[in-house]
Image (cartoon, helix red, strand yellow):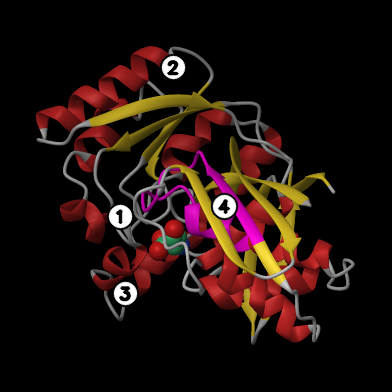
């Protein structure tokens, strides 16, 4: 039996579209056991009423990628998913499923794939590295793709609190990417490049006064505002109260980084969503340097 714990992630971090991601202290568990025959999948927590329990299950599908790569044929599998990361909210639930499945399958087959190979495989499955990299490695990860190879750098997380405000509806990454333009203005690309640089240096030097400006973005959030009613107002209202506020991944969750006043910030985020007709709740967490870990063999 292999039990893997995988963190939630908040990707993009404002300007770092498809590039930056941070892992959070909120975990899914993937427990896998080889059995004599068949496929037995149990889902607890988020997705217990909607995730597939057959060969279409994402965790199962990614496990088979590892098995076929390593020419391994398990007799049967029992998979138990304990999901604490809400689905389709921009908190890396699919990245956690992919990474959890890959790490579990790799352990079952004797850890023959390196972390780098697992990251490349996870990125190929997910389509972009910004969630899967911190889910696997932990920390804040800056990543890019060169052909099918992920080039990345992990840097330590800042000592901040993260207020995570989760709307009561799902938004698929596919839908949230459909609204993005095919081309952007040169000045908007420069706007984001400069802020991405500022953000990383602000986090590394703990120069938190820079964060608010450094989280600004022109590549995705302006186009996604209509899919997340209240996003613009939350950013406007709370960017001075918190250190900075941004859409988490492709949304609809919004995250605020702060050193203090986290409950007040959370309540204001929820009430601003409510003023825009969206039910939401908030939770307070912290970034973590830890990525996917095997808890039990
Ligand atoms: N970078 C991706 C996007 C993250 O914003 O579409 C998806 O969670």
In the picture shown, does residue 72 fall above or below 156?
A: below
Q: Position of residue 194 (x, y in %)?
A: 50, 57
In the picture shown, does residue 169 fall above or below 264?
A: below
Q: Few, some or many C-alpha atoms within 10 Å of disc 4 (few <14, some 14-19, many ≥20)?
A: many
Residue under pointer 3: 184
Q: Earlier in the sequence, mark 1 or mark 3?
A: 3
Residue under pointer 4: 21
Q: How many marks?
A: 4
Find out whether residue 22 is within the magenta segment. Answer: no
Q: Earlier in the sequence, mark 4 or mark 2?
A: 4
Which residue of the protein is positioned furthest toward the front in this rendering? 36
Q: CA distance from mark 1 to mark 4?
A: 16 Å
Mark 1 or mark 3, which is nearer to you?
1
Q: Earlier in the sequence, mark 3 or mark 4?
A: 4
Q: Which residues are magenta?
A: 78-99
Residue under pointer 1: 221
Mark 2 or mark 3, which is nearer to you?
2
Q: Few, some or many C-alpha atoms within 10 Å of disc 2 (few <14, some 14-19, many ≥20)?
A: many
**Residue 262: mark:** 2
Q: Is mark 4 within 8 Å of ligand 1?
A: yes
Q: CA distance from mark 4 to mark 2?
A: 21 Å
Q: CA distance from mark 1 to mark 3?
A: 13 Å
Q: CA distance from mark 2 to mark 3?
A: 35 Å
Q: Earlier in the sequence, mark 1 or mark 4?
A: 4
């Amino acid at each position: 039996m292999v039990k893997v714990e995988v963190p939630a992630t908040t990707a993009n971090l404002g300007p770092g579209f498809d590039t930056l991601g941070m892992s959070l202290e909120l975990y899914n568990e993937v427990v896998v056991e080889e059995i004599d025959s068949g496929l037995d999948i149990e889902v607890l927590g988020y997705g217990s009423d909607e995730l597939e329990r057959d060969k279409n299950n994402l965790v199962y599908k990614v496990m088979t990628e590892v098995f076929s790569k390593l020419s391994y044929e398990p007799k049967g599998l029992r998979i138990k998913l304990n999901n604490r990361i809400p689905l389709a909210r921009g908190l890396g639930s699919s990245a956690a499923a992919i990474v959890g499945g890959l790490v579990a399958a790799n352990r079952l087959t004797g850890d023959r794939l390196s972390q780098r190979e697992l990251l490349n495989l996870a990125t190929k499955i997910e389509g972009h590295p910004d969630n899967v990299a911190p889910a696997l490695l932990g920390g804040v990860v800056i990543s890019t793709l060169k052909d099918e190879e992920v080039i990345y750098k992990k840097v330590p997380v800042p000592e901040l609190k993260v207020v995570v405000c989760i709307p009561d509806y799902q938004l698929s990454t596919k839908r949230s990417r459909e609204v993005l333009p095919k081309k952007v203005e040169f000045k908007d690309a420069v706007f984001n490049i400069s802020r991405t640089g500022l953000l990383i240096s602000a986090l590394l030097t703990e120069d938190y006064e820079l964060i608010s400006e450094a989280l600004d973005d022109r590549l995705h959030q302006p186009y996604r505002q209509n899919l997340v009613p209240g996003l613009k107002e939350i950013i406007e209202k709370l960017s001075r109260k918190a250190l900075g506020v941004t859409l988490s991944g492709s949304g609809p969750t919004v995250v605020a980084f702060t050193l203090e006043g986290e409950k007040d910030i959370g309540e204001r985020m929820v009430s601003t969503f409510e003023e825009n007709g969206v039910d939401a709740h908030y939770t307070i967490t912290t970034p973590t340097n830890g990525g996917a870990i095997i808890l039990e063999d």
